Image (tube, rainbow, N blue to C red):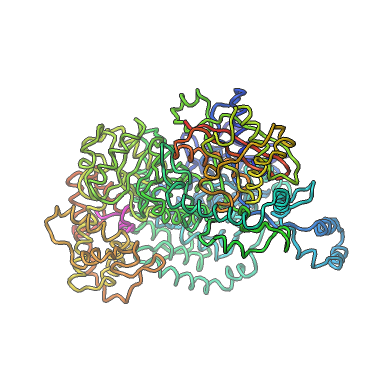
Amino acid sequence: MAGDYQHWKLETDRDNIAWLTFDKQGASANILSADVMAELDRILDELRTRNPRGLIIRSGKDSGFIAGADVEEFTRIKDADDAMRMVKRGWDLYNKLEALPFATLALVNGFCMGGGVELALACRYRVAVDQPGTRFALPEVMLGILPAWGGVKRLPRLVGPTAALDMLLTGRAVDARRAKRMGLVDAAVPPRVQENAARAMVLESPRPRKPPLAQRLMNALMRPVVARMARRQLASRASPDHYPAPYAILELWQKYDGDPFAPRPEDPASIVGLMEGDTARNLIRIFFLQERLKSLGKDSDFKAKHLHVVGAGVMGGDIAAWCAMRGLTVTLQDQSPERLAPAMKRATELFKRRLRDKSRVRDAFDRLIPDVAGDGARQADVIIEAIFENLQAKRELFAKLEAAAKPDAILASNTSSLKLADIGANFRNPSRLVGIHFFNPVPQLQLVEVVKGAGTDAEIAKKAAAFVRQIDKLPLPVRDSPGFLVNRVLGPYLDQALRMVDQGLAPETLDAAATAFGMPMGPIELADTVGLDICLAVGKELAGGSAEPPKRLAGLVAAGNLGRKTGRGFYLWKDGKARKGRAGGATHDLSEKLIGPYLKEAQAVVAEGIVADADLADAGLIFGTGFAPFRGGPLNYLATLRSEVHT
Amino acid sequence: MRNCASGMQALDSGVANMLSGRSDLVLAGGVDALSRVPLLYSEAMVVWFSNFMAAKTPLHKAGMFLKLKPTQLLTPVIGIMKGLTDPYVGLLMGQTAENLAYRFGIDRTRMDDYAARSHARVIRAQESGFFNDAHDGLSAEITPIYDEEGTLYKDDDGVRKDSTVENLAKLKPFFDRKYGNVTAGNSSQITDGAAWLVLATEEAVKRHKLEPVGRIADSQWAGLDPAQMGLGPVHASTPILKRHGLKLNDLDAWEINEAFAAQVLACLAAWKEDKYCREQLGLDGAMGELDLEKLNVDGGAIALGHPVGASGARIVLHLLHVLKRTQGKRGMASICIGGGLGGAMLVEAL
């Protein structure tokens, strides 16, 4: 009987508790594909007949509990009926699970996403294993769809609307302790007692927890008021035209109590409406582009233990802190101890924000080693140069680094405007040099360009990409050409915007026009964020030194006002935020005009083969510049425009 | 327990482990954070707490509060005072220094003179980059540290430019209030710090391609009357000198940890005193006068601070730096230990 199932293992212990272990065959992570769910359906029928004392569902994978639905299946949905069949599959299955006449419990170890959370919600109890990898999230909204397997109905009932809407509308993940605090799980326990805790809870069968009275009221009488407030908050973050999903989720909760079959297809709360729209299709496309970038780091087993970073500026310091946070030993070198101080301060902020737990913050600090003498270069597996953009200085530095480094160490430059071939000209062995180009702000931007110069050894480039994956960033192989992909495309776009400022347009107006198009940040604010000195240098490099730089830009750089990092650029910066005046009329035409050079350059880089294909260009520009995600990337957007013209 | 010499004990244990063949590469040293020494509940308060925990009924628990005296709660035991009190003779460390000052006739002026000299020497060494710069094949002695705000701590911050003889004279005696001579100004400072050394056998040096800077040639521990604990360096380093047939000034540099100005001066006085050397050290006569220009040339714990667990390792490391800088060959690092012990290490620069 136990051997009948491919993806599930069913055992019964001496207390007559059924332990159901999910271990999807031939996959590294548990995904709720159609066959998995069909099996679960049969198992639930079997259990109903057997009537055990209780049921505990757990994962057989080290990677985590359940990664969610099979996104691949979304792409095969042909019509509304298909979509509703898929919704019904999970909705009915979880209702069946919920209706079992004995205690049911989800023992969650590691990530628990989307359909995984909805499965756990259909159980009577949830126990989370308290360890760093444990995360609960409903990321459907990020794919432009909604949790249709009961999440919108059950989550607000369990934890109250405040916490539930935060998870549903943002896709934000919560860890085990947070999940316990908000009532999503009944207990958060250390790994060593996880099974005991699950067994004890099933045997004791305590009364399921209810959210506090205020939250219960908000889920009942106050629901319209809560929804109105949430809608107002949403409006300040994303427009319903660009991102309909969060609005749909809110509507589905408010009017239909999370029942996906209640709204008619033309209702904004309808999942069919969402799935037929461009946004969901484009966001799902981005999901697969992201998977593709991840797979680009899989061509090498290389694992770095020790990273040496030279240059403790904003970029170098943040690279060092990020990698220390991701578990590497990092030595950070600069000319004096004073120069390292701001990097250490930013590292504190990063560690505290991301790791929270005191001992994990301390461990990250222990891994981040200030190294004025540069002793780390001798032991490092990867060395990243992140000093100022000066060819001579970089050459001199690399001469020392090459001499000190281990023979198999990767030597990398984070240059954004110089050619790798020039930097490596004096190398004894130029095949070791590769570009590993991060984007500012490092903690936020996932993309890292891996630049393969003419002399770069193919194996080194693969190792570099594997390193990028190791630190949980997305590697994009690009050719050694001025500006690589991202800066090359941003260059003409920023240049035009900066010249429009020279012509008298307010920075605020230009930025508003760009964000109206769907860019996460306008071009002028972006220039300030990147650093105006960098913008000037990249602009010169891209223009081949022929054109005069934009006047205001040149003036600001000459005066030492370099943007966010100096507190003043086109904007005045306070506490990491630009202080903006009122924007003038940002028209649709202005948006089109602004984005024009961006689109043109994106086509050019594909034609020139800077990246392998148009999809990778889209991926790079979305993850490197935040190009309006709901449009699916600049080239995808152009293709959509063309097809609209044709039809 | 080596208290104030824990750092030196760590080095000696490392050496012992290598000699026994148990280890061939050892990281040894010490760290102390005296700024974190807690305030403790008084004993009466501890008894109250345990009775409170044992009380069974809420009424009984409530009744316990009637027995609570606020003074018990509000008068904490200062951990550091407890730590710096000898439990056998019941003296604060500063009071043992007063004993030595009395015995060898060291007056307040000489103590303050010595303390001012310690500050002046540290200032000169800091300004010359002796602590911060790499030199003579050695990397910088001090590793800068950062706090969470990104504030850089590049130097030991106990040293004061205004610690002149005149200003030090204004301080009140701390340990024997009113009539004593030992003040906070002529004592070592209570601070945080750490010092670590890598020790290796000859074979490990070759295998790991290390560049040794010095050799620990000998070490010695000695016991003495806890009330005179400050003379520990005399009792620990004299046997080493005897073993190697050396006189005080045959060595190129000396570090005697500056627990108290009076205590360092008493060590020098003891060696000079015929009676003390014969009766207490079993010598034929006085050892002689240690050249002050060889002793603590870059100042010491009075200006830098005395992070108890670290100081023993710090003075050995610093001695090596001094020897390399001055092209010296041999030096002695020695330290007194609360409770009545002394430790000493003979090192050679390579």
Report which quarter residue A9 is drawn in.
top right
Query: In the visual, does A622 lie left or right of B155?
Result: left
Q: Residue at x 57, y 33 (%)?
A: B346
Query: In the visual, does A23 lie left or right of A386?
Result: right
- Residue B138 visible to an observer of this rendering: yes
Which quarter of the figure is the N terminus of chain A placed in? top right
Helix, strand or loop: magenta stretch: helix
**Disc count in the image?**
0
Q: Residue at x 35, y 66 (%)?
A: A567
Please say whether residue A624 is one of the residues in the magenta stretch. yes
- Residue A51 visible to an observer of this rendering: no
Which quarter of the figure is the C terminus of chain A placed in? bottom left
Q: Position of residue A535 (x, y in %)?
A: 24, 58
Q: Nearer the viewer, residue A237 or A164?
A: A237
Q: Position of residue A440 (x, y in %)?
A: 34, 55
Q: Nearer the viewer, residue A547 or A603?
A: A547
Q: Residue at x 55, y 62 (%)?
A: A163
Q: Position of residue A28 (x, y in %)?
A: 47, 37
Report which quarter residue A475 is drawn in.
top left
Q: Nearer the viewer, residue B276 or A223?
A: B276
Q: Nearer the viewer, residue A358 or A87?
A: A358
Query: In the visual, does B50 lie left or right of A274?
Result: right
Please say whether residue B307 is one of the residues in the magenta stretch. no
* Range of residues picked out in magenta: A623-635
> Does residue A90 sit above or below B333 in this rendering?
below
Q: Residue furthest left?
A: A546
Q: Position of residue A234 (x, y in %)?
A: 43, 68
Query: In the visual, does A215 lie left or right of A329?
Result: right
